[in-house]
Amino acid sequence: MKPTDALEIQHDYKWKCGDANFRLILDNMIMARSGMKHKPNKIQKIIDITPQQIVNTYLSSAINVGVSNTPCYFVKDEMTDLIMFASQKLDDTDLFDTSFVPSDKGFVYFEKPLEVRDVRGRTLLGNVVVWEKGFSQGKHGIIVSIFNDAKRTPDEIASLMLSDADKNAQRNLDVIGRFHWIHSFNLIHGEVVGEAVKVPSEEEVEEMRNMVFSETGNELIELDDEAWEKYKQEKITPYTNIRRLVHAYFLIMSQTLTAKTTERGDRAQRRRLERDNLPSEVLVIQFRKTRYTSAEGGEERNVNWSHRWIVGGHWRWQPYKDPASGGEIKKRIWISPYVKGPDDKPLKTKERVYVLAR
């Protein structure tokens, strides 16, 4: 995949966002699959806002990113492995920091999707992440939406929708195209990102009883007590804290091991994108080229390695002088990581991130 292909996918997203049917289906997906549709009284009592208002916030942000001249980012496949690895290495007490978010709005395409598993044990693949800075409940943060590219790397649910088994699902996918919605959420500045893998509470599990859908996620299914107990045992699993994963992405983008280069589309592509008020260049996120030496510090050995691997990567709080206050502040930095092995070999990591709440 060429990095400039991300510009074409962003162009496609803009036109989808201008389609009323796309917005309607996206609204329905967020409302139903996020659980907002099935627990309105509880949500409104806690935060004094209706579930539809929350969904409208997510929807309007995702659409606003689509129709604006939003910066486009392309994450090389090797970086996805590093982001997932680094996410596991964070402390559960880490705080989200909006200063690491590189732009007020963003459209990022992951060449290798973020592989996660939801609370029902399904494998989901996140290719597109869009964000917008804003305020929620008077606090500064970002609104994030994640999509699977159902055309290029369909995940478990998108693959079912692509089958002929469910005509309604097929019609929905025809409208949304490659942008199969996975998740939307807020990340608030100063918020604790929490543990990497979450275990659903008893209360959350009971709420899910009213949110059991068909395999493609379009029809609610009623379960009697016996069927519900079987469903809980077979389906409900711990799930990934997706906020932590996105937090790790922004942190990694700011580290010195990350190289950022700009690639422009060809002349015809640039003209077409500029006519549609879209960026004609993409910021490519990849590993910085490094010279590898032996552990003893001698000359680099000529070894026919079959892959690359990360050596010694970990996070540390680094103190810095704050120019504004004159005091001291601390920021997360990724310490002593390097990637060993030849540039043309795949990156392999020992740890893996699984799951995503949905």
Image: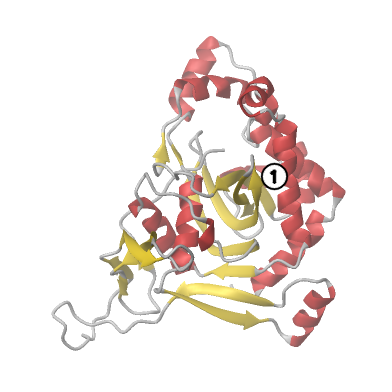
How many labels were placed on the picture? 1
Query: Where does the C terminus fall, quadrant-wise?
Result: top right
Image position of 25 (left or right of 114):
right
Residue positioned most to the top: 225
Q: Residue at x 19, y 80 (%)?
A: 294
Q: Nearer the viewer, residue 22 or 325?
A: 325
Q: Which residue is mark 1?
A: 58
Q: Is residue 336 above or below residue 156?
A: below
Q: Nearer the viewer, residue 349 or 224?
A: 349
Query: Where does the N terminus fall, quadrant-wise?
Result: bottom right
Residue 293 location in percent, x, y?
A: 23, 82
Indicate the colouring scheme.
secondary structure
Image position of 40 (left or right of 111):
right
SS assignment at label 1: helix
| Whether residue 163 is visible | no
Residue positioned most to the left: 296
Residue 350 location in percent, x, y?
A: 30, 57
Which of the 4 image quadrants contains residue 344? bottom left
Q: Residue at x 46, y 69 (%)?
A: 323
Q: Residue at x 43, y 23 (%)?
A: 233
Residue 185 location in percent, x, y?
A: 60, 44
Residue positioned most to the front: 326
- Say which amino acid is labelled 1: Tyr
| Whether residue 272 is visible | yes
Residue 313 location in percent, x, y?
A: 30, 64
